[in-house]
Amino acid sequence: AVAVVASLNVDHIVLAPRIPEPGETLMGFSTSRELGGKGGNQAVAAARLGAEVAVIGCVGQDEDGEEYREALLAEGVDVAHLRTSALPTGRAAITVDAEGVNSIVVVAGANADIPAAAAETAIGELPGLRVVVGQLEAAADATERAFAAARARGVLTVLNTAPVGDVAAKLLPLSDVVVANEVEFRQLTGQDPVDGLRRGSAELFAAGCRWVIVTLGAEGCAVLDASSSVHVPAVAVRAVDTTAAGDSFVGALAARLAEIPGEPTTADVVAACGFAATVAAVVVTRHGAHPSLPTLAEVLDA
Ligand code: ADP
């Protein structure tokens, strides 16, 4: 099973010819409202691929929160550890340009309110738990306590360093697998994701991580352990909206890693990244976050 210490947001999406400049007003094409948030997307991605998934998270006592809880239930996600807070459900403002490139502002709201002690307890209680996923949109102390509890229980921890903040440094020593995109890798290590890949990753290994995965958009991803580096190519598709590409990649990776009995090897992690790339390739050909996440059958057909 997979547990996601999850950010859960309602996305307000605008399709526009391009991303506006600072101070500029631009005429867009359309608006929509969808469920999203990196953690929620990762949880739903893994569940649609057949993984048993539990969410450790927090929503507001509002309609958005109730809608999100219902949606997770409908996906078969365990919501026994989903709490409510006096703060509003998290929200994101997303602009998608004509090339499918997005820019996003997130307001955490209730996501900042996940009780750390409850997160720790949840990790101890969930049956058959193999993988815990965290990102940096949800309460950092809850993620930290959950990861520490996972480590104590021999459960693999996967940190998606999005969006990079000060807390990343505290979580790295508790993270077995680190998944960063190019921007995050640069922010985390100060190194270029191509020329400085080995040097930057060495810092993450020194901090205690075992595998570093740097996603490179249409170029695929690089998978490194302390002594080797493998490039996993992306699947060539015509992208229309890259929203949730990285989230689906992380969800698929977690779903695959949860199927491995015992300690994964580097070959297992590389194979899981190949599967994740196939899933993410489907996602970028569709609009939105949850609506774009495929089932296992859809991935096998693609
Ligand atoms: P993020 O969405 O976090 O910025 P990336 O853009 O690196 O992450 O994308 C994550 C993964 O999604 C990539 O490693 C790749 O497998 C897949 N992907 C992203 N963009 C494309 C694309 N245009 N075509 C095919 N696959 C893509």
Image (cartoon, grey):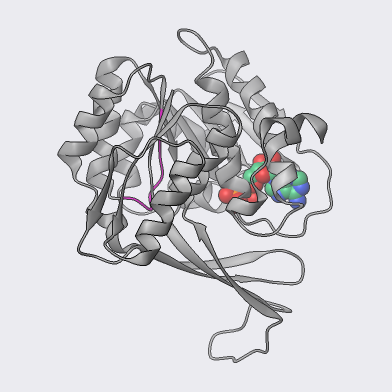
Q: Which residue is drawn at 51% across and 40% down?
A: 75
Q: In this view, does 58 lie above or below 202?
A: below
Please provide percent x and percent y for residue 142.
24, 42
Q: In this view, does 146 lie above or below 283?
A: above
Q: In this view, does 292 lie to the left or right of 236?
A: left
Please provide percent x and percent y for residue 93.
50, 71
Could you tell me if residue 248 is visible in this image?
yes
Q: Residue 177 versus residue 252: which sits nearer the camera? A: 252
Q: In this view, does 91 lie to the left or right of 154?
A: right
Q: Which residue is drawn at 27% across and 56% down?
A: 112
Q: In which quarter of the image is the N terminus?
A: top left
Could you tell me if residue 218 is visible in this image?
no
Please provide percent x and percent y for residue 163.
44, 54
Q: In this view, does 254 lie to the left or right of 267?
A: left
Q: In which quarter of the image is the C terminus?
A: top right
Q: Residue 117 versus residue 154: which sits nearer the camera? A: 117
Tell how many labels: 0
Please provide percent x and percent y for residue 18.
70, 77
Residue 39 lies in the magenta stretch: no
Q: Residue 203 versus residue 111: which sits nearer the camera? A: 111
Q: Residue at x 49, y 43 (%)?
A: 74
Give the magenta-colored segment's residue range: 132-138
Q: Is residue 114 above or below residue 124?
A: below
As drawn, the residue found furthest toward the top would be 262
- Residue 21 sits in which quadrant? bottom right
